Image: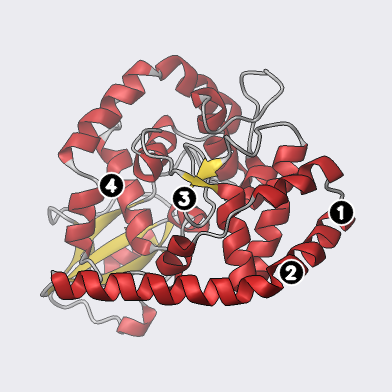
Amino acid sequence: MLLKSFFTILFLLVTSNNLSAENIDYSVWLDDFKIKAEKSGISKETIETLNRVKIIPRIIELDRNQPEFKLTLSQYLKNVVSNKRKKKGIAKIRENWSLLEALSKKYKVQPRYIVALWGIETDFGRVTGGFPVIDALTTLAYDGRRGKYFSKELINALKIIDQGHINYDKMVGSWAGAMGQTQFMPSSFLSYAQDYNNDGKKDIWNSKEDALASAANYLSNLNWRNNETWGREVIVNADFNLDESELNLKNKKNINEWQNLGVRRIDGSDLPKNNINGYLLKIKDSNKDRYFLVYSNFKKILKWNTSNYFAIAVGTLSDSININ
């Protein structure tokens, strides 16, 4: 424990020293960035908020030292789709049913998926992050490892302030700049955020209506299919012999074809009889393989977050809170 603490302190000291050395040129970088911001149409008043920014060494640490330990799918689902979250999700659907019905009608997205994303991203708006977004994005843009990407997101964040949706002090989020109850990056905010309560602001931080409408709008713009599910866990017969290289999101087959190849529901019964197309994924989980037959909506969830674990978790939670 003491050794771990020593190396943690040493890392922070080294990181802080590196940033201090680079801060000789920070003012030059900042002046150059201000010119870019002005050319992007940001007002001088909003640009001046950059003078309040503080570089945050902890963010550099988080960006460069993300955990190497990889959870198995079972471990991940146990954490993210816990029984407590399932119960809370059902309660949230019941509590917000009128709103969710209206959103479903407008955006053509089933309520259970809106609530599942809300639950997994921020525990239904409870945990939204406490880092000042402008400071976080400036730190990452200046650091340079992914400077081009974060510089664009910083410009987008300044546009959000410029448009009057939130101010510098209240714009908080994750260390990487994801914001609000939906954890939108600034670029996603500008593309998909909604002012559902018509108060003149797209407030995904404090307005549940705006946040959930924004999530629904995001999926809707990806051509979400509200008459289809996301997929299901399945099993394969002993004589299933499709090459593993064909178990991916490129090899699309009709569900009846998968049935003929030996794919069955998790309980061993036949797959549904319809014309939906799907993809078979094989995921290693501890000492066993698990199979998932996924459909078009699964790929839409991957546009939100590219992790198969995340998409399976959203689907699993949505199934658990489907109370229609």
- Which is more N-terminal, label 4 or label 2? 2
In the image, residue 242 above or below residue 215:
below
Q: What label does residue 316 carry, if any?
A: 4
- Which is more N-terminal, label 1 or label 2? 2
User: Mark 1–mark 3 contact, CB under 8 Å?
Assistant: no
Closest to the camera, between mark 4 and mark 3, is 3
| Amino acid type, callout 2 | Trp
In the image, residue 107 above or below residue 34:
above
Report x, y in % for residue 129.
43, 44
Residue closest to the eye, 290 or 184: 184
The N terminus is located in which quarter? Answer: bottom left
| Amino acid type, callout 3 | Ser
Which residue bears the numbered disc 3? 174
Q: Is residue 311 left or right of residue 5?
A: right
Which residue bears the numbered disc 1? 38
| Amino acid type, callout 4 | Thr
- Label 2, label 4: how many angstroms apart (C-alpha)? 45 Å
- Residue at left 63%, top 70%? 23
Q: Is residue 80 left or right of residue 288?
A: right
- Residue at left 31%, top 70%? 9
Q: What label does residue 270 carry, if any?
A: none
Label 4: which secondary element: helix
- Label 2, label 1: how many angstroms apart (C-alpha)? 14 Å
* Residue 17 seen in the figure: yes
- Which is more N-terminal, label 1 or label 4? 1
Closest to the camera, between mark 4 and mark 1, is 1
Q: Is residue 88 left or right of residue 168?
A: left
Residue closest to the eye, 74 or 108: 74
Report x, y in % for residue 77.
22, 53
User: Mark 2–mark 4 contact, CB under 8 Å?
Assistant: no
Closest to the camera, between mark 3 and mark 2, is 2
